[in-house]
């Protein structure tokens, strides 16, 4: 659990603290994030702002989940799922281990890119569980790599749980991490498009303003 004076719990009102402490399992953390409005505006939020304003995009959601996972005994770890450039957004997960297996908590505009039960033996297995659901609004399957995990404890002195500016630095650090490709060039050439039913299901309830526009930097 965090011990620095700027920890998230020390910044909360009694009602906020009760809510935060009610998130006692990874699934409950995900359930909370699922009630939070997806925010397409490109502004990075610390967990404190996510809790108070109930808005988040994927990085915001992963940071909040990491803070909540830390409170229940997990290290605050995030990884970034990386797409083909100019084709899709990246996607940040808060990952955890339970009974020796990996799971994840995440906020996404796509229905298939959120929670994963802790049943995956390796981080790569966990990442590949997102492959078929990692597509853009044109139905292109876009996952190409993932990063090494980033332990957010390294940002404790920057008050990452409460200071929005730290979220910007975390985003920059994610771009510097070692990357692990998941497909060969031959695999990429042979990929089939997502079928219409799966595309519609993935976009169910999506905020269309927050969808990546392929080909636009």
Image (tube, helix red, strand yellow):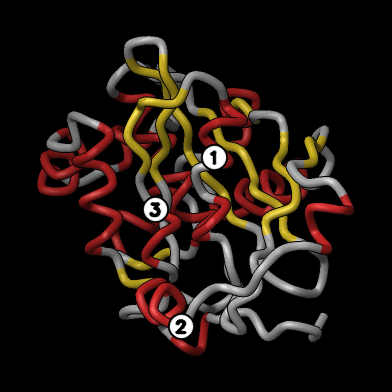
The residue drawn where x is 77% and y is 62% is 190
The furthest residue to the top: 100
Residue 212, image x, y percentages:
63, 79
Q: Along the line of sight, which residue is nearer the eye, 146 or 38?
A: 146
The answer for how far apart the CA atoms under marks 2 and 1 are is 40 Å
Residue 68, image x, y percentages:
33, 35
The residue drawn where x is 35% and y is 75% is 201
State the quadrant of the N terminus.
top left
The furthest residue to the right: 185
Which numbered circle lies on residue 114? 3
The residue drawn where x is 33% and y is 78% is 204
Q: Please tell me which of labels 3 and 1 falls first in the chain.
A: 3
The answer, for residue 214, to whether it is visible in the render is yes
Q: Along the line of sight, which residue is nearer the eye, 51 or 39?
A: 39
Instruction: Give the vertical position of 141 relative to 27 (above or below).
Output: below
Q: Which residue is mark 1?
A: 160
| Residues tagged 3 and 2 counted as in contact (Cβ below 8 A) | no
Q: Please tell me which of labels 3 and 2 falls first in the chain.
A: 3
Q: Which residue is mark 2?
A: 196
The residue drawn where x is 64% and y is 48% is 81
Could you tell whether 183 is left or right of 155 in the image?
Answer: right
Residue 217, image x, y percentages:
82, 80
Looking at the rendered structure, the secondary structure element under dot 3 is loop
Residue 37, image x, y percentages:
32, 72
Q: Along the line of sight, which residue is nearer the eye, 200 or 39?
A: 200
Nearer to us of marks 2 and 1 is 2
């Amino acid at each position: 659990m965090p011990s620095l004076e700027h920890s998230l719990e020390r910044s909360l009102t009694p009602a906020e603290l009760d809510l935060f402490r009610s998130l006692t399992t990874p699934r409950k953390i995900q359930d909370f994030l699922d009630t939070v409005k997806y925010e397409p505006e490109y502004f990075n939020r610390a967990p404190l702002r996510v809790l108070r304003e109930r808005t988040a995009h994927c990085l915001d959601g992963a940071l909040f989940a990491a803070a909540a996972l830390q409170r229940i005994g997990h290290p605050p770890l995030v990884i970034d799922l990386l797409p083909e450039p100019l084709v899709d957004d990246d996607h940040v997960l808060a990952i955890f281990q339970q009974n020796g297996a990996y799971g994840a908590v995440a906020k996404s505009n796509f229905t298939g890119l959120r929670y994963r039960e802790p049943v995956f033996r390796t981080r790569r297995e966990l990442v590949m569980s997102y492959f078929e659901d990692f597509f853009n609004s044109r139905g292109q399957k876009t996952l190409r790599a993932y990063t090494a995990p980033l332990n957010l404890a390294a940002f404790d002195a920057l008050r990452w749980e409460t200071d929005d500016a730290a979220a910007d630095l975390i985003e920059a650090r994610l771009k510097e991490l070692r990357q692990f490709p998941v497909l060969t060039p031959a695999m990429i050439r042979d990929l089939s498009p997502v079928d219409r039913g799966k595309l519609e299901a993935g976009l169910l309830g999506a905020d269309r303003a927050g969808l990546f526009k392929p080909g636009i930097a």
